[in-house]
């Protein structure tokens, strides 16, 4: 079994999987003027089971990948050690 790094918690796990979410891509006006289009698509990110279990809503919105991840990361809680 190979290992991968969770994009959220940055810990290397053996059980990290590529997770897919419905993504309502909403480009900004400047992106639209450059020819980018919006619409429904798929947002994919590597997450461990712990981080994935914290996501209640299986859909995100945003104008680019990072904006969509910011929306998704609002679901995560962080434990202090």
Image (cartoon, grey):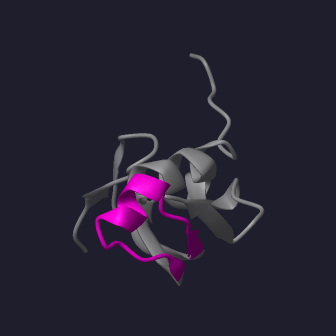
In the picture as drawn, the residue positioned furthest to the front comes out as 33
Q: Seen from this angle, which residue lies furthest left?
A: 2
* Nearer to me, 77 or 35: 35
- Residue located 42% across and 71% down the image: 44
Whether 80 is drawn above or below 23: the answer is above
Of 62 and 53, nearer the camera is: 62
Task: Locate residue 64, reporting x and y percent.
Answer: 42, 58
Q: Nearer the viewer, residue 32 or 78?
A: 32
Asked whether residue 40 is drawn in magenta, I would say no
Within the image, what quadrant is residue 49 found in?
bottom right
Please, which residue is most extreme toward the top here? 81
- Magenta segment: 23-39
Q: Left or right? Give the position of 28 relative to 5.
A: right
Image quadrant containing the C terminus: top right
Residue 11 seen by the camera: yes
Is residue 16 among the parts visible in the rendering? no
**Picture coordinates of residue 18, whole percent (x, y):** 40, 73
- Tell me: 79 left or right of 38: right
Quarter that holds the N terminus? bottom left
**Count of marks, rendered view:** 0
**Quadrant in the rendering for residue 60:** bottom right
Relative horizontal placement of residue 5, taking residue 16 as reference (left or right): left
Q: Is residue 8 left or right of residue 11?
A: right
Q: Position of residue 38 (x, y in %)?
A: 49, 76
The residue that appears at 60% across and 53% down in the rendered structure is 72
Q: Position of residue 41 (x, y in %)?
A: 50, 83
* Residue found 54% across the figure and 44% down from its top: 70
């Amino acid at each position: 079994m190979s290992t991968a790094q969770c994009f959220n918690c940055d810990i290397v796990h053996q059980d990290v999987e590529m997770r897919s979410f419905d993504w309502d891509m909403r480009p900004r006006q400047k992106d639209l003027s450059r020819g980018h289009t919006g619409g429904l698509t798929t947002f994919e990110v590597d997450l461990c089971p712990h981080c994935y279990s914290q996501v209640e809503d299986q859909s995100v919105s945003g104008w680019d990948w990072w904006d969509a991840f910011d929306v998704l990361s609002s679901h995560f809680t962080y434990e202090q050690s």
